[in-house]
Image (cartoon, rainbow, N blue to C red):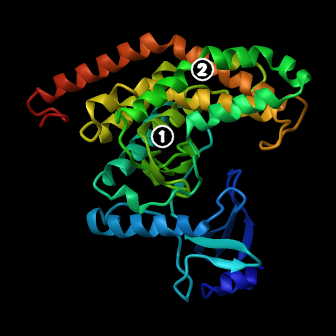
């Protein structure tokens, strides 16, 4: 297999060492290296991405646009084969090769607030650079990926069809999902009244999808572009809130370890708005805090739905695994909502300080 794949790029597999790479859960990824030549080889998971050609088309469109408008930006696109193709296809499996970015690294968890700032700034920069790009040129790579009304409909269907045992076991989680259904109602209203603008967004803003300078920790660029497609800022901002704010992730069974780090929230806001402040409408800015509720609630909804359906989507390691994941996210949601007033105060303070800095002659932020 490797011989055929690498041969399509003019590389000789027998000369390279090939080993699994990274912590991604969707695609299979390998590091391919030999005497200073390093590549990243990846197999696209077609069970998730049913039309890999859409991924390739989107990346080509964005690469061409950025080559013209921001040629200095580090855009990590796949290398084309000797025949000019985006993929090597073997037995209906899609493979591609990326260049390895020297002196870069990625991390799996936000350990310091500065890391959240660097990541948020990179995701904000990516969307800002593409604000004038015709978003209609992009194809959805996962249909209805962050469609909250659809997720709610799936939950209601699962609830109606679930066994009595599953419903009883999930009783408290179901009650919480229903109690917070205003989050879905608010999303529907925002979309219907045009308050949210379709933009080019990443849709998977976990910290590992940002390359950092290995020595300084400064952000270099965003990677893993398979989910880049038309969407709303609440997807990118919300996913950062969901995955950065607590040191405990959705697998944590001890909910006492789930805690919201307000200083991390401040860094997400600061980094993202440094790039997007002049791009977002005043209406969109009002939904910054809502973004976290949106994504955390949707993930809770998906876990509980899967539990009610008999655990058919997410892989599980023990009984009630998806139920616990859902309860974990509900706990995170409640703790996030409890911080809303504090978040609002932090945003006012950050904005006020930025405004005052603009007025100081010679200030780093003065215009």
With respect to residue 43, does 313 lie above or below?
above
Residue at 59% x, 17% y: name it.
180
Answer left or right for 110 relative to 256: left
Q: Is residue 88 above or below residue 212?
A: below
| Location of residue 198 in the rendering, given as x and y in whole percent from the top left corner | 38, 46
Image quadrant for the N terminus?
bottom right
Q: Secondary structure at mark 1?
A: helix
Which residue: 56% across, 83% down?
81
The mark that comes first in sequence, 1 or 2, is 1
| Residue at the spot 53% in from the left edge and 79% down from the top edge | 80
| Residue 311 visible in the current orientation | yes
Residue in front for this viewpoint, 246 or 152: 152
State the residue at coordinates (70%, 28%). Answer: 156
Q: Is residue 272 left or right of residue 367?
A: right
- Report which quarter residue 268 is drawn in: top left
Q: Are marks 1 and 2 in contact (CB under 8 Å)?
A: no
Question: Image check: 172 left or right of 85?
Answer: right
Instruction: Identify whether 331 is placed above or below 119.
Output: above
Looking at the rendered structure, which numbered label has been put on residue 186?
Answer: none
**Disc number at residue 333?**
2
Residues packed near mark 2 inside 10 Å, few (<14), some (14 to 19) or many (20 plus): many
Q: Mark 2: which secondary structure?
A: helix
* Circle 1 crowding by C-alpha within 10 Å: few under 14, some 14–19, many from 20: many
Q: Is residue 250 visible?
A: no
Q: Nearer the viewer, residue 83 or 10?
A: 83
In the rendered image, residue 22, in percent from the top left (x then y), is placed at 67, 54
Total labels drawn: 2
For disc 1, the marked residue is: 236
Q: Quadrant of residue 195?
A: top left
Q: CA distance from mark 1 to mark 2?
A: 17 Å
Quadrant including the C terminus:
top left
């Amino acid at each position: 297999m490797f011989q055929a794949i690498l041969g399509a790029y003019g590389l000789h597999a027998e000369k390279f060492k090939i080993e699994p790479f990274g912590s991604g859960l969707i695609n299979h990824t390998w590091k391919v290296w030999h005497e200073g030549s390093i590549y990243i080889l990846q197999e696209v998971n077609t069970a998730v991405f049913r039309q890999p050609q859409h991924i390739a088309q989107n990346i080509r469109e964005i690469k061409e646009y950025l080559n013209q408008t921001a040629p200095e930006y580090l855009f990590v696109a796949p290398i084309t084969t000797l025949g000019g193709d985006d993929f090597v296809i073997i037995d209906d499996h899609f493979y591609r090769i990326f260049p390895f970015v020297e002196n870069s690294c990625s991390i799996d968890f936000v350990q310091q607030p500065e890391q959240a700032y660097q990541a948020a700034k990179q995701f904000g920069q990516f969307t800002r650079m593409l604000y004038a790009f015709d978003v209609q040129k992009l194809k959805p790579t996962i249909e209805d990926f962050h469609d909250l009304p659809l997720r709610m409909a799936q939950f209601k269907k699962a609830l109606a069809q679930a066994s009595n045992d599953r419903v009883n076991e999930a009783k408290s989680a179901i009650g919480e999902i229903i109690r917070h259904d205003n989050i879905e109602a608010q999303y529907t209203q925002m979309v219907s009244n045009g308050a949210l603008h379709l933009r080019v967004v990443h849709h998977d803003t976990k910290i590992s999808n940002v390359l950092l300078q290995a020595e300084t920790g400064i952000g270099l660029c965003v990677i893993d572009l398979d989910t880049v497609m038309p969407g709303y800022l609440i997807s990118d901002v919300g996913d950062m809130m969901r995955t950065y704010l607590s040191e405990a992730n959705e697998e944590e069974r001890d909910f006492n370890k789930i805690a919201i780090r307000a200083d991390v929230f401040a860094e997400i806001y600061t980094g993202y708005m440094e790039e997007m402040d002049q791009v977002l409408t005043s209406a969109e800015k009002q939904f910054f805090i809502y973004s976290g509720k949106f994504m955390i609630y949707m993930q809770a909804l998906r876990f509980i739905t899967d539990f009610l359906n008999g655990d058919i989507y997410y892989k599980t390691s023990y009984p009630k695994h998806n139920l616990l994941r859902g309860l974990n996210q509900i706990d995170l949601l409640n703790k996030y909502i409890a911080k809303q007033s504090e978040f609002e105060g932090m945003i006012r303070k950050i904005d006020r300080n930025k405004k005052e800095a603009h007025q100081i002659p010679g200030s780093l932020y003065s215009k």
